[in-house]
Amino acid sequence: MFQYLIRRVLWSVVLFLAVTLVTYVLFFLVPANPARQAAGQSASPERVAEVEEFLGLNDPVYVQYYGFLKRLVIDGSLGQSFVDRSSVNDEIFRAAPITASLVFGAMAMVLAISIPIGILSALRPRSLLDRAAMTYVLIGISLPSFWIALVLSYLIGYRLGWTPIAGYCEVVSVPQAANCGGVLDWAYHMILPWFALAIVQAGVYVRFIRAEVMETMSQDYVRTARAKGAPERTVMKDHILRNALLPVVTILGMDIGLLLGGAIFIETVFGLNGLGGTAIRSIGQFDLPTLQGVVIFGAIAIIIFTLIVDLLYAWIDPRIRLS
Amino acid sequence: MKGRIWFSALMALVGTSLLVAASASGGTTGSSAASQSEAQKGGTHRMLGTSDFDHLDPALAYFTHSWNWMGATQLRMYWYPYVAGAASERIAPMAAQGMPRVSNNGKRYTITFKQGFKFSNGQAVTSASFKRAFDRAKNAKLQSPASPFVDDVASVQTPNARTLVINLKKVAPDLLARITMPFFSAVPTSAPLDAEVDKGFVSAGPYVVQEWNKKTSALMVRNPQWNNAQEPWKSLGLQNNIDRVTYSGIGGDLATHRLQCEKDEADQCGFPTAQAKELADKYGVNKGRFMVDRDLTVWRVDLNNEGALFKDNPKLRQAVLHAVDRRFMTAQHGYLAGKRTDQWLPYGMQGFKEQNLYSIKGPNYAKGKTLAQGNTRSGKAVFYAFNRAQGPPVAQSVQFNLKQIGLDVEIKLYDRVVQNTKAATRGEPFDITHEGWHADYPDPSNFINTLLDGRKLQAENNVNTSYFSGSGVANYNQKLDAAFAASGAKRLDLYAALDRDIMANGAPSVTYLSGTSRRFFSASVGCFISNAQVGTVLTTICKK
């Protein structure tokens, strides 16, 4: 187990270096100079050179990359934004909880929707319920998330007025400028984004769970369990679900990691200024430090959640020996 | 002000049009229904914007919506007053006692200040408060965008607490207009020279920023020291109706913001450009909800005067100006985005005079063909266009129009930042590019001298992206200098003549749109005034 962990951590470091290096190189391939933008467009070459020095852009790319790594490892600093000079660490710490609120809430909703529907659908294939579920799956997979989000925002938020149209409320440290705050306001503002994201994701999960349950039900060990007279509840819980949900855990871990990198469309429609919006903005403004911060956070999230999934495997399925 | 319109275009690339939503308006100011004297006091004005402020430190703030807030929080020496009508277009003293005393050689400006202004922390505003603004602008470590505006300032002195002396390296008749910019607002002498202020804000304007949570929200409240009932504040005639102004919605979607204003969840919102017509139909134009004002913006298609095709080829440039379809190009900016133009100066700018040089109703191919005949050289042109919003359709329109006069245009699409960077680099192999410009201050020199003086061309980072040095215009540099150095009505006449001369004879660019600011308010906003420099004047907003 320990060796496995060491191996995973080492691979994670390699992955991290590769991701950050690629981001750096891609950034410098684009013929746009952030110093020029910061200096203003009528600025003299001398002033642009001053800003380049100020932003540390006058060194070769590999020197800048080394400086970035050194700063990150020694000071734990992701640097400062080229655009507004704010700390990238602060920006990530500000945006990450918003994206995490969206992703974890939505994924809880996904599981709450997809597990019962997926199982019931598998138990009664081609029934009315199964057909309805598959229709939903088709719709969920086919419709783009931003369209669903816009429609929900318009119908439920604007026309019916059941929920706020957009916005995010802090749970703690509510700013004076905010028009809302606290747990209840937070949840009230998040319901629609959770639902919008969950509708799309749940479609995929329903189909996946249905297929896994159906396949597991046809396994020899399930037939043996039934032949031995095990109660149906035990067969379902210990033999079918335990095995069928194993791949779901894998997908779930990956999805959470990916979405933590930014659920861009949903965030934009509902005015959640999380990591997705931060990434888009930093690309548009050629703000490398901020973009790099989001990339690193996303990479780390994927690495951590993949690791958690692997460790969970051992707990869910004792047959798996990590060593 | 290129940075500001550049930013606006950038926002358009991510699905926004902040210029439309919360930006500076201009030229002539507009105002909404209720008269200011009857305005209701109190309440919170809730603004939504898709992007955060760049800075709220007056030495660094340069985005349009940042200036919008600077307009309410800062005390400047001179300003364009927050009133409706022509008076808003004339520079007037704000903290200054009167107009400056200018030395005989025009290089020394002595400004005397009124007594009694105070910062929000109770500290008195003195001449040193304004000198600090100049010192910060000139400080290389602060990297203020104000720096290019003080290149010609040799020194700033404060002989006493009420007097400021500005010594110039050369005569600069636009100095007064320049120092109306928020960069030159009073700041406490304790404000760091080489670092940004991003919390603990202290300001001497009618309001003060109480809180700025970066990328999240901001709050502005009344400056407790400001008293409209007494001098020196009284004579400025400000209302300060609202108690608080909040700013949020950062990272959000314009369509959603619009719904929030319709549902009264917010008071001032942006909206997708494509929805302008729908809003106009639903609420009417300038009837309190959907407001349209003239803006000091001009969109244009530049012809590279240093490229092989257009260099010393004024006939072909004039042919292009006749052949393009300004109606179509203007339409790409959305409903009521502006007025078609064929002039360099925007409508509403001092010195603007209607000239009717080219057909702005549609292409005049006959005239274009006649002028182009024998002047098309290679017959091929490269167009650097940006790849979003109005970029592609405008480029395609120009491509089609120029085909009719014998020019084959190859369009190269780039991200806006890349296109702008490439076009601003001297020697870059392009013939045509697409640009916009919003004035920093309502002075014709900010359009003509800033954008069309070939002597200012440099290796890169040019704003003169037509690389125009006067080809086709007789005695061009002398005319430029004469207009810049003149004063009063004569100055405006010279600029009007220059505007005509440049466009009729030099034809450096296809100007096609003199822009507007379009704003959308909730039903609870009762009144507001817009200003040429700072946009929606937050001190004049009132609730119903």
Image (spheres, rainbow, N blue to C red):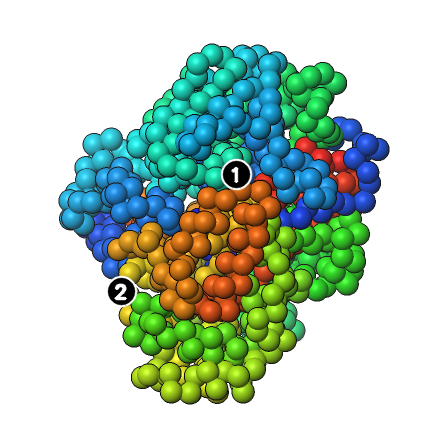
| Secondary structure found at label 1 | helix
For mark 1, what is the residue? Answer: B177
Total marks in image: 2
Residue B308 percent coordinates (x, y): 29, 74
A17 displayed left or right of B393: left
Name the residue that disc number 2 marks. B427
Q: Nearer the viewer, mark 2 or mark 1?
A: 1
**Earlier residue among tags 2 and 1:** 1
- Looking at the rendered structure, the kind of residue marked 2 is Gly
Residue type at tag 1: Ala
Residue sitting at x 71%, y 21%:
B234
Q: Position of residue B332 (x, y in %)?
A: 57, 69
Quarter containing the N terminus of chain A: top left
Kindly identify which chain the residue marked by label 1 belongs to: B
Q: Quadrant of residue B228?
A: top right
Q: Residues within 10 Å of mark 1 (few under 14, many from 20)?
A: many
Which element is circle 2 on? loop
Q: Describe residue A182's horizontal placement relative to residue A205 as left or right.
A: right
Compared across the picture, whether A53 is left or right of A169 comes to left
Residue B429 vertical placement versus B106 (above, below): below
Disc 2 is attached to a residue of which chain? B
